[in-house]
Amino acid sequence: MSVIELSLAGRGPGRAWVFDHHRFALPCWAEVGPALLITLDRHFDTVPPQNPPPRELRGDELLRWTTEKLDHRNYDHIPAAQHCGVITDAIIVARAKPVGARTDFCSAHTLDLISAEWGTPHASPEGKRAHQLVRAAERIVLDVDLDCFTTPSDADPTTVIPWTRELISDFVMPRGSSDFWNDVLAKCVGFTFAREPNHCGGLIAGGRLFETASQVLFVDLLKSDLP
């Protein structure tokens, strides 16, 4: 399975990885972990794996295990990463919970519920917990699943509607989130980006959405060049 590594020269992480299937974030996280994970996704990828990885696996062995043992539905890699010590904890921004997904992580449906009034007594309970996790973390990994920026069609739930650049920007960088991102990116050592074409309308539609989202993530947020 193809994993493309990028070198970033901007704000925050110096290393990034792009791949199709979200479970391949796990061996990438192992390159820079252990770290706190912050992930933006449509789904909670927190279903406990049926075959937890051996704690000592790294490198090619971990990539092979990810390929062969993790669920191809791409929803169990976060608990797997925590089990093998790659991820210390997670802040999850997602909306849909697969059957069996763990709900004990710090989570919210939208980023603004976490980032608003960041670090103040007026922050939401989720924001206060996230602030504690970010302050305590030595390293942070930022992760994005492209299908975060899609909405199932009311007319046909198997069809997804891609978001515009304006919607993506408002979601990733809501008003008042600068303090949140300053704290996160100051400790961010890696960025993983899953394209998930099967959840984004196919190769062509997913490719267009990837280009749009990349403008927001790489250029606007990370102040880097396009991949």
Image (cartoon, rainbow, N blue to C red):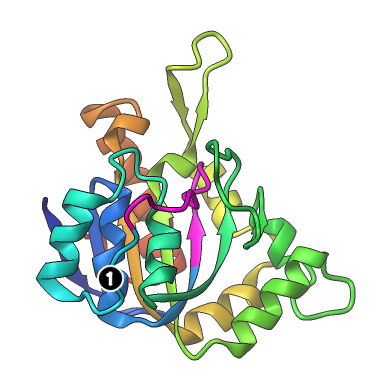
If the image is split into quadrants, where does the C terminus sit? bottom left
From this viewpoint, is residue 14 visible? no
User: Is residue 149 rendered to the left or right of residue 135?
Assistant: left
Decide: is 46 above or below 225: above
Q: Amino acid at mark 1?
A: Pro
Q: Position of residue 76 (x, y in %)?
A: 41, 51
Residue drawn 31% across the image and 81% down it:
32
Residue receiving disc 1 = 54
Task: Provide the residue span drawn in magenta.
Answer: 38-51
Residue 26 higher or lower than 132, as above or below: above
Residue at 52% x, 18% y is 153
Does the magenta stretch mainly form a helix, a strand or a loop? Answer: loop
The part of the image, by quadrant, that contains residue 108 is bottom right
Q: Nearer the viewer, residue 77 or 195?
A: 77
For label 1, the crowd category at 10 Å Cα-Cα, with few meaning under 14, some 14 to 19 and many 20 or more, is few
Q: Nearer the viewer, residue 97 or 39?
A: 97
Residue depicted at 23% across the width and 46% down the height: 20
On the image, the x and y values in percent for residue 143 come to 41, 62
Give the residue at the far right of this rendering.
122
- The foreground one among 75 and 151 is 75
Observer able to see residue 21: yes
